Amino acid sequence: MPAQRDYYDVLGVPKGAPQDEIKSAFRRLARQYHPDVSQEPDAEERFKEANEAYAVLSDEEKRAAYDRYGHAGVKGMGGVPPDFSVDFSDIFEEFFGGLGGFGRTSRRSRNMPHRGADLQLKVELAFEESVFGVEKEIEFTRDETCATCQGRGAEPGTSPTRCTTCNGQGEVRQVRQTILGSMVQVATCPTCNGAGETISSPCHTCGGRGVERKSRKKVINIPGGVDNGTQIRLAGEGQPGVNGGPNGNLYLVIQVKPHKYFRRRGEDIMLDLNINIAQATLGADVEVPSVDGAEKLKIPAGIQPGKVLRLRNKGFPYLRGTGRGDQLVVINIEIPKHLTGEQRKLFEQLAKSLGSEVRPQERSFLDWLKETLGG
């Protein structure tokens, strides 16, 4: 069979054929070559070829492009679908009556072991706890096998019985007559929901679910260096598996409370420090807060606003690796708003000695600060 035949030849219609003729031609080929009803060895390829032709010729825009440019005209327009990805819902509805046979889950698949669902729990930490790590007790709820019925769902002393609707198969079948002939519709049993069994006396504890909701407590170690949004996985602490499958996982999502003075920047800790104009001019030895306690810091004489001083190894530990970041102290010079009489006289004397000349600044303070912080 040629790789790409003319779409009109595929459907066996003339180039100017109306839409009802194109649709009728596709139906005829579908009845003949659909893989579920045809025994011909090339049925699947023929049906796919007809699908492809109908996808283009049934769409006025794609058909116009095809008539003008051929196959190249419909490339990238969704006109050449892979396998059976084209939406022929109107055709299939007539052929199959909306059958659930395509893509349905078999009872065997439903009864196979499945991993349990994952759970998520938010854990709030103080800023210092996120720096140094902490041992915390968490409490969460999850489903666990019912202790009363041992997961069977039936009241002790009773047992589930075979579903009389599907005879234990979990599926019901119905034969329908379509234009393609007799078709078998397979659907999940509405009585047992595919389980194959019904429970006449549900367990009084779990109501027939086989699991009961329980609260659990667990002590965990949270490492230092975690940040907002960091997730910690606790394997096997999620929802129980189905049909003997493994439990899901529990994910702890870290949320760090803001600090009064500190803020995080990568693995560094930022601190804004206000000093007075005398300290900035003459220099000073001061104590500043850090997560490790008070630290001595030398303010050099003549320091300018926005200057960043560094306290080594006073930041966050690296989650992957060794060592810690730094504490970055951003200097801000605080201008007094209210002066005593004596202070005003001293400033007036200082103003006379410094003069009244002013100089334009080449770069803005914000540009300089951004460059200093590497941001």
Image (spheres, helix red, strand yellow):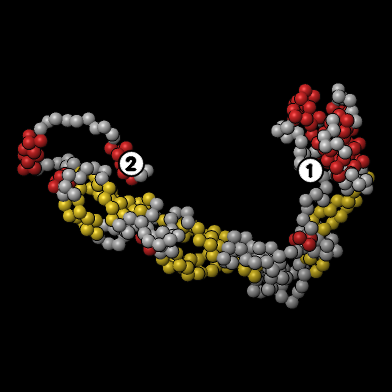
Question: Which class describes the residues within 10 Å of circle 2: few (<14), some (14-19), or many (20+)?
Answer: few
Lower position in the chain sequence, tag 1 or tag 2: 1
- Name the residue rendered at 80%, 69% in the picture: 161
Q: Is residue 203 visible?
A: no
| Residue 146, horizontal then vertical, whole percent | 65, 71
Q: Nearer the viewer, mark 1 or mark 2?
A: 2
Indicate whether 328 appears above or below 15: below
Amino acid type of disc 2?
A: Glu
- Residue designated by label 1: 83
Amino acid type of disc 1?
A: Asp
Q: Is 138 on the left or on the right of 365, as rendered? A: right
Residue 221 marker: none
Determine the image quadrant of residue 134: bottom left
Q: Is 248 on the left or on the right of 80, as rendered? A: left
- Name the residue rendered at 88%, 48% in the picture: 36
Q: Distance between the residues labelled 1 and 2?
A: 57 Å
Outermost residue, bottom direction?
157
- Name the residue rendered at 17%, 44% in the picture: 302
| Residue 260, horizontal then vertical, whole percent | 32, 53
Question: Which class describes the residues within 10 Å of circle 1: few (<14), some (14-19), or many (20+)?
Answer: few
Residue 371 marker: 2
Picture quarter with the N terminus? top right
- Circles 1 and 2: CB atoms closer than 8 Å: no
- Name the residue rendered at 61%, 63% in the picture: 248
